[in-house]
Image: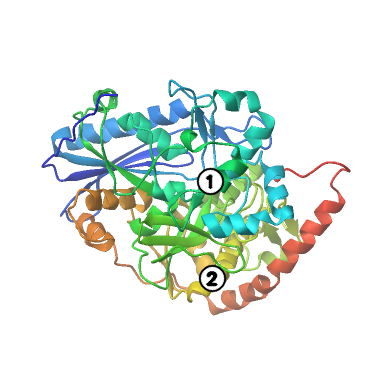
Amino acid sequence: MTAVPLVHRDGDIVLGVDLGTTAAKATAYRMGGLGGAVALAAHEYALQQPLPDRQIQDPETIIGAAQGAMRRVIAEVGSENVAALACSTAMHGLIGLDADERPLTELITWADSRATDQARSLIESGAARNLHRRSGTPVHPMSPLVKLMWFAEQEPELCRKVRWWLDLKGWLLWNLTGQIATDLSCASGTGLLDLSTRTWRPASLDLAGVTLEQLPPIVPTTAVLPLGPVPARAIGLPTGLPVIAGAGDGPLGNLGTGALDPGVGGLSLGTSGALRTVVDEPDVDAEGRLFCYALTDDAWVVGGAISNGGIIGRWILDLVGFRDDAELANLAERVPAGAEGLVMIPMLLAERAPLWDPSLHGSLLGLRRFHGRPHLARAAIEGVALQMSAIADSLNEFGPLSSIRATGGVFRSALWGQVLAAVLNIPLHVISGAGGSALGAAALGVLGLGKAGSLKEALLLLDPHAMDSDEPVPVDLRDVQTYQGVRASIGELVAEQARIAKMFEPAGRRVRGC
C-alpha cells in the first residue's frame, strides 16, 4: 500500500464524525470560536432485526451515511477551513472482512443477543469474572469476544474466510484512511484487551478462536492517520488531511459533556443509555457490575450501560399509537410519581448493567384495571430511571457522585429530566447545548493536532462554555420519597420476576434474552 503523506492545514475547523446506533452525524467545531457547532448534518440508517436475537446493520450503508453527512457539512463550512476529521463510533460492534477487505458479515451491533448461550457458559463456568477483571468488559452477548465464540461454534466455514475481524471504528478508519487499525478506547470494549499491557490478550484470543494476525493494530485515541485519496474525493477534502482515530462514543460522551472531574457523572440517554465517571487508571469494581474503557491512555471511564433507554419510550409509543416523545411525556404527566403502583422492568433487549444477565425479561408489575395508557407511559420512564439508579449505586465504590451532567434526545421532554433527578436524588444538569460524542471526538482531534495540552484545554478551545451548567433540574421532595421506596425494592422485584419467568420457560429451551 502506498503511504499517503499528511497534509497539515491552517484551517480552524475540526469535524467530529460520530457513527451511532441509528445515525451518522458530522459536526463542525471552530477552534477558538464562541462555542458550539458551526454546522452539523445527520443521515439515519436502520437497526435491522431479521431474527428475534439479531440486531444488525449493513456496513456499506453506514459508510454511505457517514460520507453523506460529511459532504453536507464540508460544503457549508468550506473544505479549506477544515483542519482535521476526528472519529467516534458506537462500541462492541463486529465485522468480518475477507482478504480483499470486503465485508463477509453484517455489522453485528452491541444490541445483538445471538451469543447469549456463550455468555451464559462463561458465567456458569466462573470464567466471566476473571475476563472482566483482565479486560474491563463484562461478559455479555454485546462483547465481541463472546460474539467471536458464537461465530467459531456456529459459522466455522465463514471464520476460515475471515482475514480481519474489525469493530465499527476499525471499519470507519479503513474506509477513511485505507489502514487497518482500531483505537485503544474501542479495543478496551471488545473483551480481548489486557488492561495491564494495553495489548490484545493471548488467552482471550484463544478463547475467542481468533489469531493476533486477524485483529487490527491498536493505536492511541489521539493517533493521526492520513485521509486516503478515494474517501477524500468522495467527501470533498484533500488527500492526506489528518484523521484522528478518536474513541468510543461512550467515553467521548463524558468528554463532550464536560463530565471530567472526580465525582461528576456523565449520563447519556438515547436509544440506549449510560452513566459514567472518569478515573486516572483502569480499574474494575468488586462486584463486577461496571465497565472500564479508555478515553486516553491516562483517562479511563468506569460506569454502566443500559440497552433499554429511549427505545422503551418508542416501544410504548408504537403500542399506544402515539407519534413522538412529547406525546409520551404528556401522557405520563397525567399520573403521579410511582404510576399509582405500576412498575415496569424495562428489559425488552438483552440488558446490560448492572446485572449483565441477558436472560432477564421485561415485565409490568402491579397491573390493575384502572391502569391505562398514561400509567404505562409513566412506568416506562420511571423504569429506565430506576435502572440508571442501580448504576449510580455501583459507582459509589469509586467515590460518591456529587453531580450529573446529562445529555440525550429524551431530554427534549422535561419530564425525563425530572424523573431521573428525583430517582437518582443527585443534582442533575441537562447540558442542552452539549455536542456529546461528536464534540468529544473533535476535542480529541484538537489534542491529536497538538493544539492543546489536556482534555479540558482541548474541549474549552472548541467551546469555552463546555464546562458550564445551568441550574439543576428542580425536584419535588415528595417524588424523591416515593421513588426511594421503589428504588429500595427494585432489585428484589427483578430477581423474583426472573425466577418466575424461568418457571414458564419451555423445557430444554434457553431464553435468548431478546
What residue is rendered at 60% in x and 50% in y? Answer: 312
Asked whether residue 241 is in view, the answer is: yes
Is 261 positioned to the left or the right of 121 in the image?
left
Return the x and y of residue 4 as percentages of the image width and height: 22, 29
Pointer 2 residue: 424
What residue is rendered at 69% in x and 67% in y? Answer: 490
- Residue at mark 2 to residue at mark 1: CA–CA distance: 40 Å
Amino acid identity at mark 2: Leu
Sequence-wise first label, 2 or 1: 1
Q: Is residue 506 above or below residue 68?
A: below
Q: Is residue 404 above or below residue 190?
A: below
Q: Is residue 308 above or below residue 415?
A: above
Return the x and y of residue 362 as percentages of the image width and height: 71, 52
Is 297 positioned to the left or the right of 213 in the image?
left
Query: From the viewer's perspective, is the residue at label 2 or at label 1 nearer?
Result: 1
Pointer 1 residue: 202
Amino acid identity at mark 1: Pro
Find out whether the residues at labels 2 and 1 contact each other: C-beta distance under 8 Å. no
The C terminus lies in quadrant: top right
Q: Residues within 10 Å of mark 2 (few under 14, many from 20)?
A: many
Q: Quadrant of residue 304?
A: bottom right
Return the x and y of residue 310 as percentages of the image width and height: 54, 50
Q: Quadrant of residue 320?
A: top right
Q: Secondary structure at mark 2?
A: helix
